[in-house]
Each structure stands twice: as structure tokens, then as C-alpha cells.
Amino acid sequence: MVSLVAAQLLQFECPIYAFITVVIVTDLQPPVSRKLGLRRIVATVVGALCGALMSFVLPPGPWGVVAGFFVAMLLAQILKAGDGARVAGYICGIVLLDHSAEPWF
């Protein structure tokens, strides 16, 4: 709730992404959130950057999304994001599916 309100106060164009990020990073147990939060945030950034950069290279459609998903997860693994690799793939897929025309927007 706080992230959504903050995003709206800051007049973000798509405040839903602030909310989605909090849902992805947060766990039901606060100690687990603190332990895994940084990895998941790094993975979110990796996925967003991969999606934005690969939208210029990959063809639109399912094969481009699959390729982007794979590259984002691989890069997150190389950066030792652990379980965050799934998050990187997920975010990359969202960017490629929903924002491929204007990924930096």
C-alpha cells in the first residue's frame, strides 16, 4: 500500500510496477524478506534492463520473450542472485510483452 501511494504521489506513469516490485520482494516472514530482498531487487533491475536492452534486438512475439527470459535468468545466476533469477526472467518477460515498443518508458 505504501509503495502504491508513494508511486502515485510521485506521479509515476505506471504505479502498478512499484506495487508489483514490493509483492515480488516481500515474503510472508519478515526475516526471509530481509534476507532475500536485496537479491530480488537486484534481479528485478537485471530483468528490467535485460528486457529494455533486448527489445531492440529480439523479434517481438513468444520466441523473443523466451530468449529474453532465458538471458535474464542466466545473467541473474551469473550475478549470484540465487532464487532471484526467476524474478529477473519474470520482469524481463513483462517488459518484452508489454513495453517492447517503448521499453525505457
Image: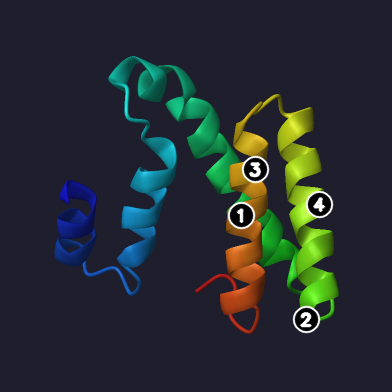
Q: Which residue is mark 3?
A: 86
Element marked by disc 3: helix
Q: CA distance from mark 3 to mark 1?
A: 6 Å
**How far across and how far down the image is residue 85, in percent?**
67, 38
Q: Answer yes or no: do the residues labelled 3 and 1 have beta carbons within 8 Å?
A: yes
- The quarter holding residue 98 reads bottom right
Under mark 4, the amino acid is: Phe
Under mark 1, the amino acid is: Tyr
Element marked by disc 1: helix
- How packed is label 4: few (under 14 Cα within 10 Å), some, or many (20 or more)? some
Q: Earlier in the sequence, mark 3 or mark 4?
A: 4
Q: Residue at x 70, y 56 (%)?
A: 50
Badge number at residue 70? 4
**How far across and how far down the image is residue 63, in percent?**
85, 72
Q: How is the image coloured?
A: rainbow
Badge number at residue 61? 2
Element marked by disc 2: loop
Q: CA distance from mark 1 to mark 4?
A: 10 Å
Q: Answer yes or no: do the residues labelled 1 and 4 have beta carbons within 8 Å?
A: no
Badge number at residue 90? 1
Q: Earlier in the sequence, mark 1 or mark 4?
A: 4
Q: Residue at x 40, y 19 (%)?
A: 32
**Is 67 rendered above or below residue 33?**
below
Asked whether the viewer can see residue 25, the reply is yes
Under mark 2, the amino acid is: Gly
Q: Earlier in the sequence, mark 1 or mark 2?
A: 2
Under mark 3, the amino acid is: Arg
